[in-house]
Image: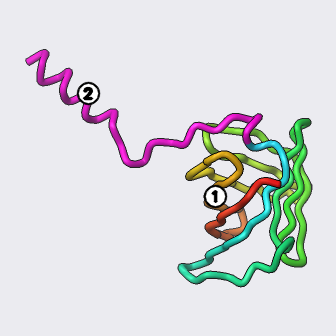
Amino acid sequence: MLLCATMFLSLSSCSDDDEVLVTTEQIIGTWDVIWAEQDGESLDVPEGYIYINLNEDGSYRTTMFDDYYIGTYKLEGNTVVGTTKDPITEYYKFTSLDGNNASIDYSNSVGDRYKFKAVKR
């Protein structure tokens, strides 16, 4: 019985949805979005049209096409949670992070959702 319980706990801790380990040091900097998807469709993203600048002091700026958002952020697990002055809450969930390359699921409190591939400058 104890063996079965141990095996169950061991198997249940393995998951395909394991969070990517992200540290503040890894995310600080400017991330240029090189690919974006909304509602399953790829978007044309000219260079410099979407970027995220995360500063050491907890402030950030996001530029998306002709709009920009300024606020403060905190790192919660693998998700950067930003709050703008509007206030709008933005979520940048790092689904993969390999050096200066990242895949990010973006959403905000107004209902926008995107998938990004980004490169850190």
Which residues are drawn in magenta? 1-26
Give the alpha-carbon distance from disc 2 to disc 1, as whole Å.
30 Å
Q: Is residue 60 left or right of residue 26?
A: right
Query: Which of pointers 2 and 1 indicates the residue nearer the eye?
Result: 1
Q: Quadrant of residue 48?
A: bottom right
- Whole-percent x, y for residue 88 in the image: 80, 59
Taking the spot 42% from the left edge, 48% from the top edge, the residue there is: 17
- What residue does disc 1 label? 104
Q: Amino acid at mark 2?
A: Leu
Asked whether 27 or 13 is in front, the reply is 27
Q: Quadrant of residue 84?
A: bottom right
Crowding at label 1, few (<14), some or many (≥20) Cα neighbours within 10 Å? many
Question: Are circles 2 and 1 on residues that touch, CB within 8 Å?
Answer: no
- Asked if residue 12 lies in the magenta stretch, the reply is yes
Seen in the picture, residue 1 relative to 84 is either above or below; the reply is: above
Which quarter of the rendered picture does the C terminus lie within? bottom right
Toward the top, the furthest residue is 2
Asked whether 61 or 21 is in front, the reply is 21
Taking the spot 67% from the left edge, 82% from the top edge, the residue there is: 43
Asked whether 54 or 35 is in front, the reply is 35
Check the image and tell me how it is coloured: rainbow
- What residue does disc 2 label? 9
Taking the spot 82% from the left edge, 63% from the top edge, the residue there is: 51
Asked whether 31 or 85 is in front, the reply is 31
Seen in the picture, residue 61 relative to 77 is either above or below; the reply is: below
Q: Is residue 104 left or right of residue 56?
A: left
Q: Is residue 111 left or right of residue 57?
A: left
Q: Amino acid at mark 1?
A: Ile
Seen in the picture, residue 7 relative to 61 is either above or below; the reply is: above
- Whole-percent x, y for residue 13 in the image: 33, 33
- Asked if residue 107 lies in the magenta stretch, the reply is no
Which quarter of the rendered picture does the N terminus lie within? top left
